[in-house]
Image (cartoon, rainbow, N blue to C red):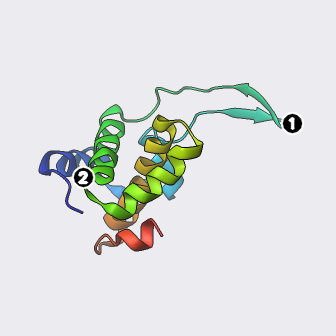
Amino acid sequence: MNLTPFSGLTIVLESGEIARFDAVGQYTSYCRLVPALRFSNGKKKGTGNRKCGNRYLAWAWMEAANFAIRFEPAIQRWYQRNAARKPRLVALKAVAHKLARTGYYLLRDGGTFDVHRAFA
């Protein structure tokens, strides 16, 4: 899967030095791809600051997810399975989240993207 050069450059440049994130969860949170919810005793107590993070990374990963769903059959099948039981935007954000997790490891360790490993 090849991203458009603009989206790829946006992701690389807006991510900055990837070593500043200790874990993949911190990176995906910075990309605004996880909900900012607070729970106490199993009850929702608030939504937190949902505007924390980088809005340009959120945009770039969502664009990458749209592109991937359109042109990669394995990702399209995974998305359609999720969209059948969840709202469309939730399933799209799940694809963006998986791509961002994969992107974090690619930026940190190098290598190439394997769609079957990410969306098996």
**Label 1: how many Cα within 10 Å (few below 14, some 14–19, many 20+):** few
Q: Position of residue 37 (x, y in %)?
A: 65, 33
**Please, what secondary structure does the residue beneath circle 2 have?**
helix
The answer to whether residue 50 is left or right of residue 105 is right
CA separation in Å, label 2 and label 1? 39 Å
**Please, what secondary structure does the residue beneath circle 1 have?**
loop
Residue drawn 43% across and 67% down?
Answer: 118
Amino acid carrying label 2: it is Val
Which numbered marker is on residue 12?
Answer: 2
Tally of numbered tags: 2
The answer to whether residue 68 is left or right of residue 88 is left
70 or 93: which is nearer to us?
70
Please say whether residue 27 is visible from this viewpoint: no
Does 90 sit above or below residue 113?
A: above
Rendering quarter of residue 43: top right
87 or 43: which is nearer to us?
87
Does 78 sit above or below residue 86?
A: below
Residue drawn 40% across and 72% down?
Answer: 116
Q: Position of residue 22 (x, y in %)?
A: 50, 58
Q: Position of residue 1 (x, y in %)?
A: 24, 63
Which numbered marker is on residue 41?
Answer: 1
Amino acid carrying label 1: it is Asn
Q: Farthest residue to the left: give it.
A: 5
